[in-house]
Image: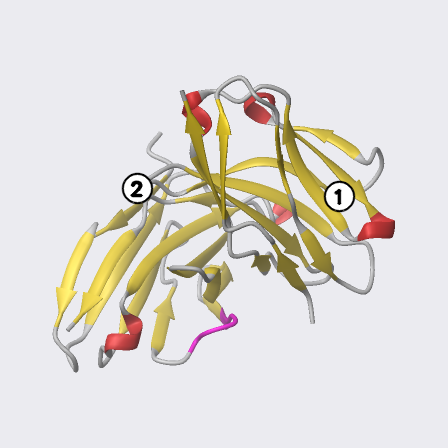
C-alpha cells in the first residue's frame, strides 16, 4: 500500500515551458487535492476533485489546470510556467465521508527559471 | 473569511521539556480544527482533529490539543518533547459546508535541543 505518490520529485523548467505533475493514490479515495507550499505561506489549495471527471477551483487556481480521468489519478498541469510558480506542490486525498482527514504525498519541488 | 494564525514562526525547546504551539482561528461558527506535522522533506501527516464534543482531543505521538471557543484557539501541547518531534507544525481549519477546503496557518517550526 503506497498511499499517495507524486511524480516527479524534482523538476526545473524554463519560463514558458509546460509540464504535468502526476498524483496517484491506492486508497480508493473519492476526493483529491493539489496544494502549493511557499516559504512562510503555509499550504494553499490550487484545485480539488470530488470524484472522477469532476474538478473545482481552490484558493489559487490561476495558471494551473487539472484533470481527473481516473479515480486514482489527479493531474496538475502548468501550460506556460512562470517564476511565480516556483514552489513545492503537494497532492492529497481523502474519503468523501471524512474529507478533512487528508493523506498527503511527499511533494514535488518545482523551480521555474 | 476563515483564517488561521500561528503567532510563532520558530520555537526551540529542550528535549524532555513541555511544548505548546499556539493557533488562533477566525470563523463565524464552530469550525473543524486540525493539526498536521511535516517532517523535513516529507508530506504532511494528520496529528489530531476536533469536530465537536470534548474540547480536549488526543492525537498520535503523544500530542493533545484543546479547543477554547472563547479564545478562538486550538493550541497543541505535548508534556515531554523528543528529538524526533523536530518538524514543522501546521494548524488548519475546515469550513463546514465545503468539500475538504482546508485553510492552513503559516506553520511553526519546532527545533529540539539535546
Q: Which residues are magenta?
A: A56-61
- Identified at 78% across, 42% down, the residue is B67
Rendered location of residue A28, percent (x, y): 46, 42
Determine the image quadrant of residue A36. bottom left
Q: Is residue A36 above or below residue B22?
A: below
Residue at image point 34% right, 40% down: B42
Q: Nearer the viewer, mark 2 or mark 1?
A: 2
Query: Residue A68, image x and y in percent?
Result: 39, 62
Q: Residue at x 38, y 59 (%)?
A: A39
> Is disc 1 placed on a helix, strand or loop?
loop
Q: Position of residue A42 (x, y in %)?
A: 47, 57
Q: Name the residue at 75% across, 43% down.
A: B51
Q: Which residue is mark 2?
A: B41
In the image, B32: left or right of B84?
Answer: right
Q: In the rendered image, which quarter contains the C terminus of chain A?
A: bottom left
Residue A49 vs residue B39, the one in the foreground = B39
Give the answer, above or below, for where B96 lies relative to B65.
Answer: below
- Mark 1 — on which chain does it sit? B
- Distance from the alpha carbon under mark 2 to that under mark 1: 29 Å
Location of residue A33 in the rendering, given as x and y in whole percent from the top left corner: 46, 58
Determine whether, in the image, residue B5 is placed left or right of residue B13: right
Outermost right residue: B70
Query: Of A47 and B11, which appears nearest the observer?
Result: B11
Q: Which residue is mark 1?
A: B51
Amino acid at each position: 500500500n503506497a498511499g499517495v505518490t507524486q511524480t516527479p520529485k524534482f523538476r526545473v523548467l524554463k519560463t514558458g515551458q509546460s509540464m504535468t505533475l502526476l498524483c496517484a493514490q491506492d486508497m480508493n479515495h473519492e476526493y483529491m487535492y493539489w496544494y502549493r507550499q511557499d516559504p512562510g505561506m503555509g499550504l494553499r489549495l490550487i484545485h480539488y476533485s470530488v470524484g472522477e471527471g469532476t474538478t473545482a477551483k481552490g484558493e489559487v487556481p490561476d495558471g494551473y489546470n487539472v484533470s481527473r480521468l481516473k479515480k486514482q489519478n489527479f493531474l496538475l498541469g502548468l501550460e506556460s510556467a512562470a517564476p511565480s510558480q516556483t514552489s513545492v506542490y503537494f497532492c492529497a486525498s481523502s474519503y468523501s465521508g471524512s474529507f478533512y482527514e487528508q493523506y498527503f504525498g511527499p511533494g514535488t519541488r518545482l523551480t521555474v527559471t | 473569511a476563515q483564517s488561521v494564525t500561528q503567532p510563532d514562526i520558530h520555537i526551540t525547546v529542550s528535549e524532555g521539556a513541555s511544548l505548546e504551539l499556539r493557533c488562533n482561528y477566525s470563523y463565524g461558527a464552530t469550525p473543524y480544527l486540525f493539526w498536521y506535522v511535516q517532517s523535513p522533506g516529507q508530506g504532511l501527516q494528520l496529528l489530531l482533529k476536533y469536530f465537536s464534543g470534548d474540547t480536549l482531543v488526543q492525537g498520535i505521538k503523544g500530542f493533545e490539543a484543546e479547543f477554547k471557543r472563547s479564545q478562538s484557539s486550538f493550541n497543541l501541547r505535548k508534556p515531554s518533547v523528543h528529538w524526533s518531534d523536530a518538524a514543522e507544525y501546521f494548524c488548519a481549519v475546515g469550513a463546514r459546508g465545503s468539500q475538504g477546503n482546508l485553510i492552513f496557518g503559516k506553520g511553526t517550526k519546532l527545533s529540539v535541543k539535546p
